[in-house]
Image (tube, rainbow, N blue to C red):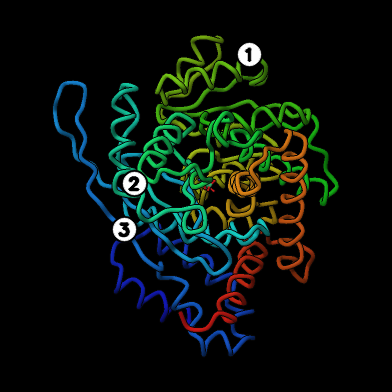
Amino acid sequence: MTIDKLMFDLEARHPGETEYLQAVKEVLISIEEVYNQHPEFEKAKIIERLVEPDRIFTFRVPWVDDHGEVQVNLGYRIQFNNAIGPYKGGLRFHPSVNLSILKFLGFEQIFKNALTTLPMGGAKGGSDFYIKGKSDAEVMRFCQAFMLELWHNIGPNMDVPAGDIGVGAREVGYLYGMYKKLIREHTGTITGKGLEYGGSLIRPEATGYGGLYFVDRMLHTHGHDIKGKTIAISGFGNVAWGAALKANQMGAKVVTLSGPDGYIYDPDGVSGEKIDYMLELRATGNDEVSPYAEQFGVEFFEGKRPWEQKVDIALPCATQNELDRKDALALIGNNVLCVAEISNMGCTPGAIDLFIEHKILYGPGKAVNAGGVSTSGLEMTQNAMHLSWPATEVDNRLHQIMSNIHDQCVKYGTQPDGYINYMKGANIAGFMKVAHAMMEQGIV
Ligand code: GLU
C-alpha cells in the first residue's frame, strides 16, 4: 500500500470531502505497517473496498412548519460496511451535516463497532435539520417525514440507526413511531429508544460512562488514580452529561462545560444539581452554555474553548476537530496528563501529532466513545431476546467491553519504547477484525 497514491486517488474521486479524507488518512497511517505484512489484503484490495461505502442514500425531506410554510431539508444514510454485522450507527441532525461529515462518521463507526466485539457493521446518517428553535410539533413532523424515506432501507438485521448530535430520546421516539406505523412490526430497528418501548437502561449515559471507564483504565495502566483529578469537558449534551456524572462518581472534578457561545469555568466542580440543570437546559432546545454561568455565578468565557484552562484531563465531548494544535500546545504547556476524545474525531491531526510527540496519554474517539454504540448493541440483544436487563447487568457489560477495548489498544499500540499509542492500537485492532471478515466472505 502506498498511502500517498491511495489518498491522491481518493481526493480526485471525492474532492472537498475534507473530514472524510482526514479520517481515512489517519487509519491508513496507523495500519500501513501491518497491512504490508499481509500481501493477501493487497491482492483482495481490502483498503480500496473498505474506504468506499457499500451504498449511500440521499433524499429530500419536505415538511410543513408551524406557520404553514414548506421547509425542505436533506436526508442521508450511509451504509458503509456490514462485514461483521448489520449496519449500525447514529443519525446526526445539525446544520453542519454534509456528505463528508457523515462519511467520516460512518468510516470511523466501522472500526469502533469492530472494537466493541459485538456483531455490528458501520453506518451513519442524518440531516441538515436544526433542532434549535423548533417546536415539538415541528420536530415530530420532520422526524416523520425523514422516516417516510428511510424505512425501506433499515431493519433489525439490515441497518439499525440511533442518535447522535441533535437526535436524542425525543427524536428517536418520533422516528421509531413512524417506522413502526409503516412496517407494522415492533422490532429493535432503532436504538436509544425509551424504556417503555424497548430501550435499554444505561443507554442515555453510556457514551459518557464508557469514556470514563476507558480513561480510568488508561490512568491506572500508567500508575495514576482518577480520584482528585481536574477535568475539562467540552459540550453539555448527553455525552458531556454522562461523562460529568461518572467523573463525579469516580471522585474527579469537572471544571468546564461549553457550547457554541463559549465555555464556563466552575472551580467548585460541575456536580449534583448543576448536572441536572445542564440536562434540563438542553432539553429546552437551547445549546448555549452561558445561562449556566448566570445561574451558578461562575465565569463565562465568550467565544473561547475550555482547553486554555489548567487541568489534568481534557475530554472533548462535543464535535469533530474541536481541539486543534494551538489548544494542544496550551494543554501540554499546562502539563495535561490525559486527553481522551468522547466526541468523534475531536482532535485535529496536528493536535494528535503533538500529544504523541510529547508522550501524552491520548485516547481516540473510536475507542473512548465506543460505550454508546456498545450499549446500543446490548439494546439490540435485549430486543432480540424480548427481555430487558437490569441496570447493573448492562453497566457491568459496558465496563467489561471498555476494558477489553483498552486492552486491544495496548496489545496493538504499545511502541518499542513502551509508550502506548492508543490511536494506532485502536485502528489496527479494529481494522484487522474487519479485514479478516472481508477476506473470508470473498469479493462482494
Ligand atoms: N452516535 C453514536 C456514535 O457515534 C452512537 C451510535 C449508535 O448507538 O448506534 O457511536
Element assignment for label 2: loop
Asked if one can make out residue 339 in the rendered structure from this viewpoint, the answer is: no
Front-lying residue, 226 or 308: 226
- Which of pointers 2 and 1 lies earlier in the amino acid sequence? 2
Element assignment for label 1: helix
Element assignment for label 3: strand
Residue 9 is situated, as x and y percent measured from the top left of the image, at 35, 78
Position of 229 with respect to 22 (left or right) is: right
Q: How many marks?
A: 3
- Residues marked 2 and 3 touching at CB (< 8 Å): no
What's the distance in space between the residues labelled 3 and 1, CA to CA?
43 Å
At a point 42% along the width and 78% down the height, the residue shown is 6
Give the answer, above or below, for where 431 lies relative to 188: below
Identify residue for label 3: 57
Identify residue for label 1: 273
Ligand 1 closer than 8 Å to the CB at disc 3? no
Residue 25 is situated, as x and y percent measured from the top left of the image, at 47, 68
Residue 310 is situated, as x and y percent measured from the top left of the image, at 64, 33
Asked if one can make out residue 205 in the rendered structure from this viewpoint, the answer is: yes
Give the answer, above or below, for where 401 lies relative to 61: below
At a point 85% along the width and 47% down the height, the residue shown is 223
Give the answer, above or below, for where 48 lies relative to 367: below
- Which of pointers 3 and 1 lies earlier in the amino acid sequence? 3
Residue 146 is situated, as x and y percent measured from the top left of the image, at 31, 42
Q: Amino acid at mark 3?
A: Phe
Identify residue for label 2: 97
Position of 183 with respect to 145 (left or right) is: right
